Image: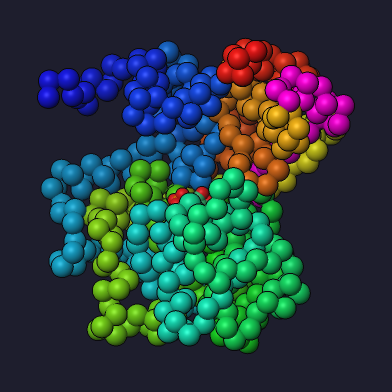
Amino acid sequence: MSDLISVDECEQLTPEHVHDLYRRHVNRSQVSLMTSFGFGRELVERAEGAYLWTRSGRRILDFTGGVGVLNHGHNHPRILAARKRFQELRRMEVHKTYFSPYVAALGHNLAQLLPGDLNMSFFPNSGAEAVEGAVKLAYKYHRGRRHRILRADIAFHGKLLGSGSLTGAHQNFTFPGIPGVEVFPYGDLDAVRRLAGKDVYAILIEPFSASTMTACSEEFLRGLRELCDVHDIVLIFDEIYTGWGKTGSLFHFMRYPGLVPDVVTTSKSFGGGKSSISAYIAREPVFRKAYDNLGDSLMNSTSTTYYGFGEETATAVEAVNIAVEDDYPARARAIERVLAPGLERIRKTYPDTVAQVRGVGALYGIFLDGGPKLLDRVARLAPVGLARDPNFRVKLITCAVIDALYRDHGVYAYYTLNGANPLVAAPPLVVEPADVEYFLDSLDQTLGQGLLRLVTRFVKEKVAPRWGS
Ligand SMILES: Cc1ncc(COP(=O)(O)O)c(C=O)c1O
């Protein structure tokens, strides 16, 4: 047993050693893919607020926002203090048959903050579990007598077998999934009308799709609500990414007064950047009809191992309080006031490069393109098989820009794997306006170098060695 690695020794591992261990024990292809980027070649020493510091001493502005997890930024002091207090007081972690004051408080707080009778909460650990919990609730609400569930063509709801079958991302392999899933075009109320009926138990939708930067109109969402009322269908809003202020309201749907889904899901920043916790919150009558009897009472809420773990839920209580006290929706709107016009300026400066800029609050997508001529030249840099895929060419351009932002400006960004692969600007809500300006200047200077130059450099230095050319 002497060659086990200790936690202390983890701190001493070099990037090369970590890659090697990943290759042998985690995921070899991930190493090939991620070491194409500067960030795949470095390790992070520490992270605070909107910044992280690499082992090599670089300060990096994190504009990924932790892909929705870091509205509070890295290691928010109040989140750390809540966790430290929990540990110092030796609080109990596993609440199976003892009741947890933190679960009780978290349920209360959510009911306070969400509109209408969205009063009943369930707290698993991942977004996919919250989605699947919501779908099970809807199925049980109809006592298993209805067999169809509707979801949009634009949809990301997770990667487990169930949630994966409700996700619309292009995947090159199909797993078995939930039966009876039918698909409507995002935002198309007439299409939903044609599909809705007495055999549909749920409609699942992201009011704002963070993977494609597309929003449902108010009219569409209110139309869904009406349809669901008419046919007694359970309406589920997936706000796993967009909750806790990201788009400028506490939840995206809350910008529309009086609009109340039957169930809403949340995760990511719900855990304050530290805790892996999610939730679905259901309207009281819906929850009660599904599960509120002694026989079914353990079917839902106490039935996962990590449900209601002490430190996770205590952290979420603090995360929610911070989001409200520090008015995270207002912070997102303040970020938007700098980010939106800045990106628009950049789009106008580089009309051949930036096809579109789209988003809301602190969540924007920059759709890079470069026109057919450039795409054609980019295609010639890649092996024939890959070059034929138009998606691949856009991805390559976007990756080249992300790589240059990181290398030349210390800005960390990502692109979505769904839809048209936009470069995402989604900073933590604790960034300063000056940070947003810095991101905009960095993007401007990067695009100013010209896409062809960026892509050629990226391919030559980072990618071609992997193609063996
Ligand atoms: C809208 C939405 N739903 C569900 C999920 C799945 O969450 P998880 O990855 O925690 O399972 C995500 C994750 O990105 C998401 O953005």
User: Which residue shows up at 61% across the image and 42% down it?
Assistant: 417
**Along the horizontal axis of the image, is 18 left or right of 406?**
left
Q: Could you say where residue 462 lies in the image, as x and y percent from the top left?
A: 60, 16
| Color encoding of the figure | rainbow
**Which image quadrant for residue 345?**
top right
User: Which residue shows up at 14% across the image and 48% down it?
Assistant: 89
In reply to whether residue 373 is colored magenta, the answer given is yes
Mark yes or no: residue 231 visible.
yes
Q: How many marks?
A: 0
Q: Could you say where residue 261 lies in the image, as x and y percent from the top left?
A: 55, 73
User: Which residue shows up at 23% across the image and 64% down it?
Assistant: 101
User: Which residue shows up at 65% across the image and 56% down it?
Assistant: 154
Report the front residue among 29 and 51.
29
Q: Quadrant of the N terminus?
A: top left
Q: Could you say where residue 273 lies in the image, as x and y percent from the top left?
A: 40, 43
**Along the horizontal axis of the image, is 91 left or right of 368?**
left
Q: Which residues are magenta?
A: 360-384
Give above or below for 39 relative to 16: below
Q: Could you say where residue 49 lies in the image, as x and y percent from the top left?
A: 45, 34
Report the front residue among 414 and 417.
417
**Which image quadrant for residue 231?**
bottom right
